[in-house]
Image: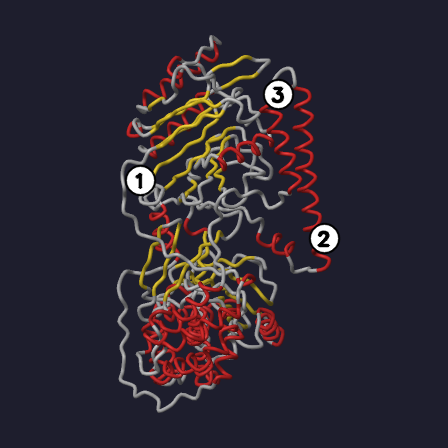
């Protein structure tokens, strides 16, 4: 692509109009780690491992699943695994053997990638080398020497060369001649699958001509299908039509049906009306221009293309063409700058608007999930393998089905629940909060409320009376987010899971929480500042510092504890003992058991979904999860019986402070408490990270370096 932005424009125009699926490119014009013009939905770019990458893979077909293989990618080599629906998986490599770099290094890297991938691999490479194997006529001695080294690579890995004779040269530059230096390779098993190899002339301004070929898929494969997530475009809704249809469908709800049937009927009624009257978000189709594109640019682009078709733009009309082309590029830069200026100025009228969101989340460029490293030292090869590894790492489950013990509880005669309370619970949920699989947001429920209020209140009332949580509301769609740009995207633990739960389920959770708080709130420790009304990190800090300041003892030392995967690993069995000891009613215990049992989590990568049944932990993304954690943490906050010790918690962060007149006494006191805390954690299936545990002097001026015993390890104090 010669690092030319005009070539990126021309490539996009051709590939979209010709319905090209994938482009393997070298020397792309990069800016900030992306290729302008090829950095927007539905186009996905897999770049080499550098902001100024020398190779990239551009995927135009939105139906293809794509995995970046960062473990094999280099600055001048991009690797991607691609899956077509119901077809076998293939790997694509785009490589650039830079002219002024030793070719041996590039060949070694490409050979290593082929060794790992083994099969079903297609390679597009700018070799800058000559060989009769790819019909190169160049007699340059350096080019021939390089060519022999590439030949050795081909022979060692039994690669196919797909270049064909009697085609135009792949490289042509008016002042430097022409040659064949761009090579298409594949592993042996793809020999008959690469067809129609051709060199195209005058598609772009690049001195490397476009090569096109067809890749056949000769084998159908059955894959686990993905769970399609429904998303509605609320701003385009026909609310009158929605209410009219919902008013008809909601009457299918039968008060005498089972709770599960009733929940399914209500969900189906709202979803059907929404699908009929609210446009759905979907994958972009057809020709999709960048978001900053204007009609003026369309005309300018057409003028450039017409000039290339009708005049000799390479020789006699070259200067005139350069003027037309540069004018088009100047207009692109001006248009993008003006859009950015308008975008930035929006902060004056709306400080929390588009600019704030862009700064917080970055651009809307379509992201490509990378393949992941496995514990065995390999990498995931398919979207399904990637989804399964993410699920196993981020949602701990031991494969067993936890059978919670149920004691017979007579249904309530009638639950004290009003329409006002249900409405308030719906309105507490942000209208734009991400919904679960059904796509029903709080905004949709608010519009539906006048139509469904009788039926939904009746259903929630029955759930509370019979202590049952509907099965269809127990599924979590897990979205994984990279924890930060400094994290290694090939490591599964670099991701944070976000569970998306049905909004109707969250409403019922809120109703359960209201009743549970009324039963146990007075018995909860005042030292928990997380997930608690009128408490915060600031109140936790103030409470701690006030206690330290008021101590008359000479020394105060503090231990800051980090619980590994606290929310994910909490044992359910001991949780119910904690609930019962705090005064939870039998009905609350029963509905929470129903809520936890048979919960499912699903991680989707591309069109493949991995699922599991949860057997422990507080459901992330839920309303109930935080209060259940506080219930379990409450026991830890009460393991001491002396005013010489102060414990403060914020969610799963715990600080233990000890006051004493002498260091040995402080060490003894804190070791006793730590033993009790370890016992508390072990009973609940939890572990502390000794590497993240910190010992700090809060009062007394002790020099860092003293230690305390923490289980079988010693923790050394450090400076605040």
State how far apart marks 1 and 3 are (Cα).
Answer: 45 Å
Which residue shows up at 61% across the image and 74% down it?
A: 546
The residue closer to the viewer here, 144 or 434, is 434
Secondary-structure class at tag 2: helix
| Lower sequence index among marks 2 and 1 | 1
Q: Which residue is mark 3?
A: 311
| Lower sequence index among marks 2 and 3 | 3
Answer with left or right where residue 279 lies relative to residue 546: left
State how far apart marks 2 and 3 are (Cα).
Answer: 43 Å
Label at residue 88: 1
For disc 2, the neighbor class at 10 Å (few under 14, some 14 to 19, many from 20) is few
Which dot, 2 or 3, sits closer to the camera? 3
The residue closer to the viewer here, 44 or 372, is 44
Residue 373 percent location from the top left of the image: 38, 44
How was this image coloured? secondary structure
Residue 356 percent location from the top left of the image: 64, 56
State how far apart marks 2 and 1 are (Cα).
Answer: 49 Å
Q: Quadrant of the C terminus?
A: bottom right
Q: Quadrant of the N terminus?
A: top right
Secondary-structure class at tag 1: loop
Asked if residue 311 is positioned above or below residue 649 in the image, the reply reads above
Q: Which residue is mark 2?
A: 345
Which dot, 1 or 3, sits closer to the camera? 3
Residue 367 percent location from the top left of the image: 49, 46
| Lower sequence index among marks 1 and 3 | 1
Q: Please identify the residue farthest to the bottom as the structure is shown.
A: 413
């Amino acid at each position: 692509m010669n690092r030319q932005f005009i070539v990126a424009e021309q490539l996009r125009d051709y590939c979209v109009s010709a319905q090209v699926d994938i482009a393997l490119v070298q020397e792309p014009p990069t800016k900030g780690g992306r290729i302008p013009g090829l950095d927007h939905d539905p186009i996905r770019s897999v770049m080499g491992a550098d902001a100024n990458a020398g190779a990239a893979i551009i995927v135009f077909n939105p139906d293809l699943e794509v995995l970046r293989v960062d473990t094999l990618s280099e600055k001048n080599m991009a690797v991607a695994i691609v899956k077509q629906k119901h077809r076998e998986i293939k790997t694509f490599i785009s490589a650039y053997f830079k002219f002024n770099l030793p070719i041996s290094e590039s060949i070694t890297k490409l050979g290593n990638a082929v060794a790992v991938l083994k099969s079903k691999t297609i390679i597009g490479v700018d070799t800058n080398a000559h060989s009769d194997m790819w019909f190169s006529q160049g007699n340059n001695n350096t080019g021939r020497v390089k060519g022999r080294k590439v030949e050795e690579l081909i022979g060692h890995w039994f690669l196919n060369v797909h270049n064909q004779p009697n085609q135009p040269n792949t490289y042509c530059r008016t002042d430097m001649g022409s040659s064949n230096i761009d090579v298409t390779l594949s592993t042996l098993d793809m020999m008959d699958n690469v067809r129609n190899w051709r060199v195209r002339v005058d598609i772009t301004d690049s001195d490397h001509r476009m090569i096109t070929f067809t890749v056949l898929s000769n084998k159908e494969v059955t894959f686990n299908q993905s769970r399609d997530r429904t998303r509605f475009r609320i701003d385009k809704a026909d609310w009158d039509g929605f209410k009219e249809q919902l008013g008809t469908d909601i009457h299918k709800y039968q008060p005498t049906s089972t709770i599960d049937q009733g929940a399914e009927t209500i969900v189906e009624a709202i979803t059907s009306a929404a699908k009929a009257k609210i446009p759905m978000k979907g994958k972009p189709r057809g020709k999709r221009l960048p978001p900053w594109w204007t009609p003026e640019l369309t005309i300018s682009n057409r003028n450039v293309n017409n000039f290339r078709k009708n005049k000799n733009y390479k020789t006699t009309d070259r200067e005139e063409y350069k003027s037309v082309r540069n004018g088009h590029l100047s207009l692109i830069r001006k248009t993008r700058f003006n859009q950015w200026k308008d975008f930035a100025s929006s902060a004056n009228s709306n400080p929390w608007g588009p600019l704030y969101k862009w700064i917080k989340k970055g651009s809307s460029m379509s992201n490509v999930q990378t393949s992941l490293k496995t514990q065995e030292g390999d990498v995931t090869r398919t979207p399904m393998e990637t989804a399964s590894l993410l699920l196993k790492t981020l949602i701990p489950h031991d494969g067993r089905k936890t059978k919670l013990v149920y004691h017979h509880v007579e249904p309530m005669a009638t639950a004290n629940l009003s329409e006002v309370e249900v409405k308030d619970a719906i309105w507490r949920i942000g209208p734009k909060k991400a919904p679960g699989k059904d796509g029903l947001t709080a905004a949709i429920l608010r519009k539906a409320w006048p139509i469904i209020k009788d039926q939904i209140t009746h259903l929630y009332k029955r759930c509370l009376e019979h202590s049952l949580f509907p099965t269809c509301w127990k599924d979590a769609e897990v979205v994984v987010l990279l924890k930060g740009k400094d994290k290694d995207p090939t490591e599964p633990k670099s991701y944070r899971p976000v569970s998306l739960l049905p909004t109707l389920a969250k409403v019922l959770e809120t109703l359960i929480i209201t009743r549970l708080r009324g039963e146990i709130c007075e018995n909860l420790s005042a030292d928990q500042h997380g997930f608690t009304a009128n408490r915060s990190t600031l109140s936790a800090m103030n409470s701690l510092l006030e206690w330290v300041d008021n101590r008359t003892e000479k020394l105060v030392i503090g231990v800051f504890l980090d619980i590994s995967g606290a929310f994910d690993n909490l044992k359910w069995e001991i949780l119910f003992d904690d609930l019962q000891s705090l005064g939870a009613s039998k009905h609350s215990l029963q509905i929470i058991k129903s809520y936890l049992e048979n919960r499912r989590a699903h991680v989707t990568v591309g069109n493949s979904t991995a699922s599991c049944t949860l057997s422990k932990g507080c459901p992330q993304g839920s309303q109930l999860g935080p209060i259940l954690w506080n219930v379990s943490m409450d026991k830890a906050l009460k393991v001491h019986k002396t005013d010489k010790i102060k414990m403060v918690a914020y969610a799963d962060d715990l600080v233990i402070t000890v006051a004493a007149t002498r260091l040995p006494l402080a060490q003894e006191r804190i070791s006793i408490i730590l033993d009790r805390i370890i016992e508390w954690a072990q009973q609940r299936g939890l572990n502390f990270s000794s590497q993240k545990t910190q010992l700090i002097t809060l009062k007394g001026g002790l020099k860092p370096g003293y230690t305390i015993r923490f289980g079988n390890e010693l923790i050394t104090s450090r400076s605040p």
